[in-house]
Image (cartoon, rainbow, N blue to C red):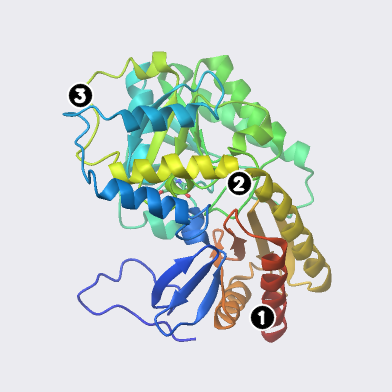
Amino acid sequence: MSVKSYSDSVSKVWPLFTNVDVDYGEDIFLYDRQGKKFIDFTSGIGVTNTGHCHPRVVNAIKEQSEKLLHGQTTILYNSMIDELANSIIKILPDELNCVFFSNSGSEAVESAIKLVRHATGKPNIICFQGGYHGRSIGALSLTTAKSVYRSGYQPLMSGVFVSPHPYFKQHSDENSEQRVKQCLDELDHILNTQTSPDETAAMIMEPILGEGGYIAPPKAFIQGVRDICDKHNILLIFDEIQTGFGRTGKYFAFEHFEIKPDILVIAKGIASGLPLSGIVANKKMMDKWITGSHGGTYAPNPLSIAAAIETIKILEEDNLVSNSEEIGEYLLNGLQKMKNEYPDIIDVRGKGLMIGCEFVEEDGLPGTFIAEKVRENCLSKGLILLTCGPYNQVIRWIPPLTTKKSDVDRSLSIFEKALKQTL
Ligand code: PLP
């Protein structure tokens, strides 16, 4: 399928994956300007957890838009910000009890970097191989998911050290226990040689790799990282920008690993499509931040706050987090059955409605070409999916949390037709 491109008056730096000239969205569906209907199982890259244009969210935005579009938060108090912060900390452990808002995921990661440096007086940060934390210079410095993101932008932020993730060598013969031990030993080594505990403010990780390939590491790895942080008095930041707000069948993915981060980075699913992000940490740490030393003109925008307050209510009242768990399992089972029939699928994995289906070429190389072809064939049949992974060899399924079993059946039938057409 040929991909329509924007005119020369629009920068081409952002890749365009489809030729869908999108007109409007409704729950799990998008419609193009010719009226063609698509199932959107990208959720706008994990954003529209309540589906496109949920009527309650639309209504909240409409009502807010007639009252106030911009309320500069350093000049004016707005009680809606208190309301939203309280509804976020209500779904989090007691220690995570103070929120700072921003607009995009990358901005929130920048906030986390600045907070940990400020709070600890230490400069260095350890991140993990395959992680994606955004594209502003600070966030990009912590991002290693794909080389294209970094190349040409050096020098990046100093004081960043990259530690291995058990994901790499995933299909090797080593068992996961050995691999976890190696990765934790290596982390300890980096911490005590390349940097030092006295100079390391924090470690940052996605509890489940997003761009890096939709990989949940073994629980022992995440718990081991937590232990090393505790032993050396280092803060642990979880970037839950893609995994938050019910995406993985829990409100936040850290719940799967039975540990708590010191700082949680949130965005995407928080406001059903309006730009909003933030970090959540302990009030004592937040209070160390010198007033006026961080912030911006826009965040949090009143429309985004209204959308987020309503989004969190919908997640709870419509049981969308448990739906994510139940429908996720149903989708995972369906894809696992296909894995048994198609040897080009080497792995199907996921938690909740964050599922990756990884392809491999006959010679064992990453199945980049197959994944791309299957994605294109799905698109021409009305199912929008995205790829991820260092070689784009994984098709990721990120359906809205409103998805029903019948929607999964329909999408799996399209996916199987696309597989047959490709393989
Ligand atoms: N962190 C993670 C885990 C993400 O998935 C993303 C975006 O995909 C970001 C950070 C960056 O967010 P944004 O694109 O809003 O800057």
Left or right: residue 111 compared with residue 86: left
Disc with the residue nearer the chain's start (1 vs 2): 2
Select label 1 or label 2 by which is in front: 2
Return the mark for residue 292.
3
> Residue at left 51%, top 15%?
233
With respect to residue 404, does 325 lie above or below?
A: above
Label 3 environment density (alpha carbons within 10 Å; few <14, some 14–19, many ≥20): few
Disc with the residue nearer the chain's start (1 vs 3): 3
Q: Amino acid at mark 2?
A: Asp
Residue 92 seen in render: yes
> Residue at left 45%, top 19%?
282
- Picture coordinates of residue 390, whole percent (x, y): 54, 59
Callout 3 secondary element: loop
Label 2 environment density (alpha carbons within 10 Å; few <14, some 14–19, many ≥20): few
Q: Amino acid at mark 3?
A: Gly
Residue 128 seen in render: no
Which sits in the foreground, 66 or 358? Answer: 66
Q: Quadrant of residue 414?
A: bottom right
User: Which residue is tagged 1?
Assistant: 418
Left or right: residue 111 compared with residue 261: left
User: Which residue is tagged 2?
Assistant: 318
Disc with the residue nearer the chain's start (2 vs 3): 3
Q: CA distance from mark 2 to mark 3?
A: 39 Å
Return the mark for residue 168.
none
Count all numbered tags in the image, as a single digit.
3
Left or right: residue 116 compared with residue 92: left
> Residue at left 73%, top 55%?
171
Q: Quadrant of residue 254?
A: top right
